[in-house]
Image (cartoon, coloured by chain):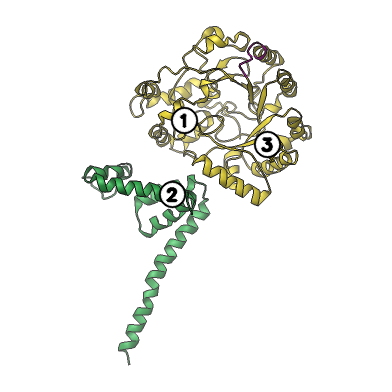
Chain colours: A yellow, B green
Amino acid sequence: MKSLLAMQHTLASAPAQLAVLAGAAGERFPFFTEKLKEQAKFPLKPANLAVLQVNIGKMCNQVCKHCHVDAGPDRKEIMTRETMTACLDALRNNPGITTVDLTGGAPELNPDFRWFVAGIKQLDRHVIVRCNLTIILSNKRFYDLPKFYKSYNIEVVSSLPSFTADRTDRQRGDGVFKDSIAALQMLNEEGYGMPGTGLILNLVYNPAGAFLPPNQQSLEKEYKVELKRLYDISFNQLYAITNMPISRYLDYLLASGNYEKYMEKLVDAFNPAAVDSVMCRNTISVGWDGHLYDCDFNQMLDLKVSCGNSAHISRLDVRELEKRDIMLNQHCYGCTAGAGSSCGGAVT
Amino acid sequence: MADNYYDPKDLKNFPGIGDFQKELADKFFSWYTEVFKDSALTAKEKSLVALAVAHAVQCPYCIDAYSSDAFEKGWSEAQMMEAVHVAASIKGGAALVHGVQMMNKVREISM
């Protein structure tokens, strides 16, 4: 399977995705901005900036069907050491940013990944790595990743959409479940997810289909019982994350005839209580080329932060960013549906 | 009135039954919500029971709702089909066990 970009698919372009989202907006589905106005929550304003989520490259060893990044082995966009240095400078100058969340693609495929992590830890920040698990087994040079994570006390967050092979492989590719289980066992051996070690291993559930996640708490309970029983695997928390109707997931929705029904589900499940806790309020997303966005999804739709002077990491100005209006579009319904959704799972 | 007896859109309008009798509808939906919560059985287990019953009572609305709900809660296609077979077995068995009654009657009146 190739990325949409490699296939020269229309939906590889951000404007084409926005055009689909705009298609039924205001008629069949109310504008997201109108929903916020009804709740007196428009414009959506940020809280204090605490998290820098850095996308250090779109290259990935997997080609998941729902990937909002359209990542894959054929993607070449990668963050340079110069841009990473600008991120480190921004962290040095802004002590209020306490967490750095590294994502991709597979962030470990960036040749400067370990150098960057060491630099962030020197600045005494909490580091989260969104590890796809299979990267650990993909090449001998990655076998030591669990030890590397441990040496810096990095929090590992990994996708596992099911505790069964069938459903996992349907979403993430053939053989992914088997390698993911082996990687989780390696992480457990290092102490990740084990009681008393302080080494955090959180899992992510994404629906493998055109539906919303079930109750996060019930699902976590079931995952813990089944992963322990079947594979002797332990972990800390399960994050249930809603799929956003963009990029490859949007392609799947359209191709399977589920787009309108899915949007209807998101709109019907709009939860005003989730709005206050959406991740764009305390997070800034940094693209592989250093541009700044309100979230990773806006990054993929090329919707840059609304304050032009601070639109690049080299010019990050927290005071200006904290005054901005957050860029909104129809995909934002994904973060406010049901219990809400963020990179840390449900928000209510 | 639609030209057909069943319309998928009616499922979404189910709460509208309260327009004609609010008190009883409120009681029903409150009880229904409580029934499907995690308790001695998990919400996931209850969803599979509901799917089987939906087939036994042959309710298209319920089949629509609980096919989605059971799959979303993590049951596999094979597990869901086995649940339908359980419902079908009970329905088939319920018909067939009356064969004993038929045999009893025939034996009573035959020479």
* Front residue of A155 and A186: A155
Q: Residue at x 36, y 75 (%)?
A: B98
Q: Are marks 2 and 1 on the same chain?
A: no
Residue A158 x, y percent position in the rendering? 63, 35
Up-down relation of residue A222 to residue A121 (above or below) = below
Counting residues from the start of the chain, the first of labels 3 and 1 encountered is: 3
Chain of the residue that carries numbered disc 2 in the rendered image: B
Q: Is residue A339 magenta?
A: no
Quarter of the image where one finds residue B108: bottom left
Chain of the residue that carries numbered disc 1 in the rendered image: A
Q: Residue at x 41, y 28 (%)?
A: A272
Which residue type does callout 2 highlight? Answer: Ser
- Mark in the foreground, 2 or 1: 1
Q: Are marks 3 and 2 on the same chain?
A: no
- A140 left or right, relative to A244: right
Residue A121 x, y percent position in the rendering? 72, 21
Q: Which residue is mark 3?
A: A133
Residue furthest to the front: A196
Q: Which residue is mark 2?
A: B67
Up-down relation of residue A310 to residue A288 (above or below) = above
> Where is the N terminus of chain A found, in terms of image quarters?
top right
Highlighted range, magenta: A91-97
- The answer to whether any part of residue A164 appears in the image is no
Which residue type does callout 3 highlight? Answer: Leu
Q: Which residue is mark 1?
A: A334
Question: Marks 2/1: CA distance?
Answer: 22 Å
Question: Marks 3/2: CA distance?
Answer: 31 Å
